[in-house]
Structures are given as structure tokens and as C-alpha cells.
Image (spheres, helix red, strand yellow):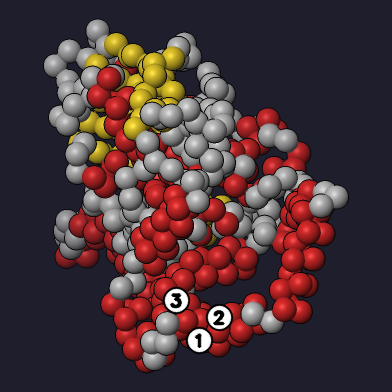
């Protein structure tokens, strides 16, 4: 586990590999909005509103001072005092003008942002409609055509030969190597948007293949928006279990030794670094006399991508089931760990997670079974999770990371949305799988969050910081850190390790 004893400083990015430095600007969608604007622009708009309010307040004070008396009507008043009165009048007038100008600019900015949000919604609706029509056409025309071709003996022979060539002599390894040598193919916001639309249009493909008329498909698609993930995930799991893969099992949370770090984390980077790897969950309990207990739950990412049964609860089935809105083994195991650590429904809980851990964290925060007051997720496909209002924290995504797009369009606008492009066109992209999804790429984004200028981001960072710090700083406070390994329990022996 990567623990940091000091808050991130201005040189924090230098601790990252060279390949993960750089990146784009931070973009933010405030609570209740789906429009992403740059953190710098948001900060400027916030200062403009502050200027309007401050100028208005000072103008009232100056005008009040100037109006204490009518200096011109008082005999014997020195000329200097009458001149000071005129200066105060002029100052009040100018301050009112500044306040009015700032108010007009503020109003214009609000109108522009509202227009931009409507425009963005129209664009997204158009893309959704186009992808739905395209998927329906592919299902209506492409699927029958493929079935027809598949019955042609020459086509079948070609497919068999091609598959044999790919499988033999390292063909799959060469294909994998080619993708690793060309990481920009999957590392771009455009590709991520394509993935999101493809996920969203899966049911349109299915309805087209089954002969549902296009107008009816579009009506049904609008009324069942968000159900694509559940139906698609269920279909994949059903098909997998029929072939002996993607099997489910009971779970267990096994206590393991936690790190000695018990000081409350400060900043997004420290919280991200505290999320464990290796199929584990970390639970920190903060207690102080006379105060309700506070608990921070840090859930780690996928432990294995194997579709075969293994000991790991954070496996591929849990990925699919979690994105589809089910009750995956990883979530069940985290609940077991929380209960073993003594967490109750009355305790105030802050959930944090990276990748699959973010799915689990969001599910638990939305479940209603826990007193969730904060949520911070990184790289998590949680677009379909309906979150309660009032949560502190944020959902953090790299806009060129395809994994969050697997959760479909974002509906969790009751949480601050923060995005950043991990690799701009001029940056070097490392030859690794899904570069923008790597934890180091998100460490760079967390550093940018800790340097954010906008009050919207700084307020959420401060709220998440205060959750533990307020209790840990009190007399008699205690902090208990526990870690658990999240395992499956099989009646028969699993076919693979962790």
C-alpha cells in the first residue's frame, strides 16, 4: 500500500513516472448539472460573483457614510470636509456601477452556461438517437447477414482458418502486442464516447435483430433508458455460467494486518493512495468521547480479470454484475468486513473506491443500509447508480479512460463530477493496457484536484478532509485501521488462484 505522511505539495507530480506527467485541465460539473466546465473558468465565475456582492456591500457602507449629513447646508463647515463628502458620494456611485457591471456579467455568464448546458444536452440526445438507429440497423441487417454468411461453407472455412492462424504461433500475443504498441487507439475522449454510446445502444441492437420496428424501438429505448446495463450484464453472466465460467459463490472477508498509518488523510491524493490493492478493503474507525463514530471504507480495484473460478471476490463476474446493478461478490464481502469491524447503521460512513472498488463504494452509499455522508470514486463505471442527495465528495474520471464509460451515461449528478484528460495529444502514452485507467494516471488527476482553484472543488476536498480530521483532533480520540482480504468460498476447488 502506498501511504503518504505529508500532504501533496507543488512538486507532487514529480513523484509520478514520466509517462504520467502532463495531462489536460481539470473540468467540473457542479451538483445537479451535467455540463463540464474548466476549473479555472469556474473559479473566475465564482470571483465575479464575489466581486458583485462585495462591491454592492461596500457601496452601501460608503453611501451611508456620505449621507450622515448634508455638509453643504451646515454653516462653517470647512471646505475640505465638504470636499470629502463629495468624494464619498462619487465613490459610492462608482462602487454601485462596479456592482451593477459585475451583476450584469454574472447574469450573462449564468445565461451562457444555461445555454451551453442545453446545447450539450441536445448534442448528447442527438448522439444517442444516432447510435440507437445505427445499432438497430446493425441488428436488423447485419445480424441476419452474418447468420447467412455463417452457413456458407466457404465463409466457415475462412473463419476456421483465420481463427487457427490467430490462435497458433503466438497470434493472440502479437495482436495484444500491437494494441500495446498503439495505445492511442483506445486512449482518446472520442473513443471513450464511442464506448459509452455502444454500451447505451446494446438493447437497440437486440431489438433490431428481433424485428422490432425502428419507431417502436426508439420509444421503448426512451422509456427503458438505463436498463441496457442490467439486461446486458444478465445475458453475459447467463451465457458464461452455461459454459462453466463467471460462476458465483459465497464470500468471506479475512482479516489481514493493516498498515500502521492512522493519521487522517489530507487531500484527494492521500485518500486515493490509501485505497488498497490485492483484493482488499481498508476500514478506518474514528472515535472520540461524546461524538458519533465515523468510519472510512476504502475499497480496492479488480483483483483478477479471469473468467474462471478463483479465490478472488473482486473478479470479472463482480465487474459485470456491479456495472449491471446487481449484488456482486465484492460488495457482499465488503459488507461482511464492515460488520466484522463493528460498523453499524448509526455510524457516519465515508465510502471511497477505485475502479471496481468505486462501483462497490457507490452501491453501498446508495443502498440505504448505511449512514453514508461521503463518497469519492476514481475510474469507476457508476453512471447508472442513483445516489442520495447531500453526499460530500466527488466522482473522478479521466476523460480518455474507457472503463468509466462501461457504466453508460452519467446519472449520478447529485455528486460533484470531476474529469481530466490523462494524456493530451502532445503527451507520451505508455505501452500498457488502458493507460488512462492506471492508478498513476489518477494520482496525477488527484494532484490536480488538490491544486484546484474553484470553490466547488475545494469545498468538497475540505468536507472529505474534515470527516476524519474533526474527530481525530479531539481529546481522547482513537483511530483503528483494519484490512480484510475479500475471498470467494467454493464448495468445490476453484480452477485458478487469485
Q: Which residue is mark 3?
A: 206
Expressed as whole percent of the image width and height from the top left, the position of residue 157 reads 76, 72
Q: CA distance from mark 2 to mark 3?
A: 9 Å
Q: Residue at x 72, y 45 (%)?
A: 432
For label 1, the SS is: helix
Give the crowd class for mark 2: few <14, some 14-19, many >=20 residues within 10 Å.
some
Circle 1 residues within 10 Å: few <14, some 14–19, many ≥20: many
Q: Describe residue 105's horizontal placement relative to residue 7 as left or right.
A: left
- Mark 2 vs 3: CB contact within 8 A: no
Task: State the CA–CA distance, disc 1 to disc 3.
Answer: 9 Å
Give the answer, above or below, for where 391 lies relative to 167: above
Q: Nearer the viewer, residue 28 or 256?
A: 256
Residue closest to the far right: 169
Residue found at x 34% / y 89%: 216
Q: Earlier in the sequence, mark 1 or mark 3?
A: 1
Disc 2 target residue: 143
Q: Quadrant of the N terminus?
A: top right
Badge 2 or badge 3: first in the primary sequence: 2
**Quarter-of-image position of residue 344:** top left
CA gap, disc 1 to disc 2?
6 Å
Residue in front for this viewpoint, 256 or 56:
256
| Secondary element type, mark 2 | helix
Q: Residue 348: x, y in percent?
A: 22, 31
- Which residue is painted at 73% across and 70% down in the image? 159
Q: Nearer the viewer, residue 160 or 328?
A: 160
Q: Which mark is residue 140?
A: 1
Asked whether residue 417 is in view, the answer is: no
Q: Are marks 1 and 2 in contact (CB under 8 Å)?
A: yes
Amino acid at each position: 500500500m502506498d501511504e503518504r505522511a505529508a500532504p501533496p505539495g507543488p512538486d507532487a507530480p514529480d513523484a509520478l513516472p514520466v509517462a504520467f506527467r502532463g495531462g489536460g485541465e481539470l473540468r467540473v460539473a457542479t451538483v445537479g448539472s451535467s455540463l463540464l466546465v474548466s476549473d479555472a473558468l469556474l473559479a473566475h465565475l465564482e470571483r465575479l460573483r464575489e466581486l458583485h456582492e462585495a462591491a454592492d456591500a461596500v457601496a452601501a457602507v460608503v453611501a451611508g457614510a456620505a449621507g450622515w449629513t448634508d455638509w453643504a447646508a451646515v454653516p462653517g463647515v470647512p471646505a475640505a470636509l465638504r470636499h470629502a463628502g463629495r468624494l464619498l458620494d462619487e465613490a459610492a456611485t462608482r462602487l454601485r456601477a462596479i456592482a451593477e457591471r459585475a451583476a450584469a456579467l454574472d447574469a450573462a455568464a449564468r445565461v451562457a452556461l444555461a445555454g451551453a448546458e442545453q446545447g450539450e444536452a441536445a448534442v448528447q440526445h442527438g448522439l444517442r438517437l444516432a447510435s440507437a438507429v445505427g445499432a438497430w440497423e446493425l441488428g436488423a441487417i447485419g445480424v441476419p447477414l452474418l447468420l447467412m454468411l455463417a452457413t456458407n461453407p466457404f465463409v466457415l472455412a475462412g473463419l476456421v482458418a483465420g481463427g487457427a492462424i490467430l490462435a497458433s504461433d503466438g497470434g493472440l500475443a502479437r495482436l495484444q502486442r500491437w494494441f500495446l504498441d498503439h495505445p492511442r487507439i483506445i486512449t482518446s475522449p472520442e473513443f471513450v464516447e464511442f464506448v459509452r454510446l455502444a454500451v447505451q445502444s446494446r438493447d437497440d441492437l437486440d431489438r433490431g435483430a428481433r424485428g422490432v420496428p425502428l419507431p417502436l424501438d426508439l420509444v421503448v429505448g426512451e422509456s427503458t433508458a438505463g436498463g441496457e446495463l442490467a439486461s446486458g450484464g444478465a445475458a453475459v453472466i447467463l451465457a458464461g455460467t452455461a459454459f462453466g465460467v463467471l460462476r458465483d459463490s459465497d464470500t468471506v472477508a479475512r482479516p489481514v494486518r493493516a498498515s500502521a498509518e492512522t493519521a487522517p488523510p489530507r487531500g484527494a491524493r492521500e485518500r486515493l493512495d490509501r485505497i488498497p490493492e490485492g483484493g482488499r478493503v481498508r476500514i478506518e474507525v474514528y472515535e472520540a468521547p461524546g461524538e458519533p463514530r465515523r468510519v472510512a471504507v476504502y475499497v480496492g480495484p479488480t483483483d483478477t480479470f479471469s473468467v474462471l473460478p478463483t479465490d478472488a471476490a473482486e473478479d470479472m463476474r463482480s465487474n459485470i454484475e456491479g456495472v449491471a446493478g446487481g449484488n456482486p461478490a465484492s460488495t457482499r464481502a465488503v459488507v461482511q468486513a464492515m460488520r466484522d469491524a463493528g460498523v453499524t447503521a448509526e455510524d457516519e460512513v465515508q465510502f471511497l473506491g477505485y475502479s471496481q472498488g468505486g462501483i462497490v463504494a457507490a452501491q453501498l452509499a446508495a443502498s440505504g443500509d448505511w449512514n453514508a455522508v461521503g463518497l469519492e470514486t476514481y475510474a469507476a463505471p457508476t453512471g447508472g447508480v442513483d445516489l442520495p442527495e447531500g453526499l460530500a465528495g466527488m466522482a473522478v474520471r479521466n476523460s480518455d479512460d474507457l472503463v468509466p464509460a462501461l457504466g453508460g451515461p452519467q446519472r449520478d449528478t447529485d455528486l460533484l463530477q470531476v474529469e481530466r484528460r490523462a494524456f493530451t495529444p502532445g503527451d507520451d502514452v505508455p505501452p500498457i493496457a488502458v493507460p488512462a485507467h492506471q492508478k498513476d494516471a489518477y494520482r496525477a488527476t488527484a494532484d490536480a484536484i488538490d491544486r484546484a482553484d474553484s470553490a466547488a472543488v475545494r469545498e468538497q476536498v475540505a468536507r472529505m478532509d474534515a470527516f476524519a480530521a474533526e474527530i481525530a483532533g479531539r481529546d481522547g480520540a482513537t483511530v483503528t485501521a483494519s484490512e480484510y482480504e475479500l475471498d470467494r468460498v467454493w464448495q468445490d476447488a476453484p480452477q485458478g488462484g487469485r
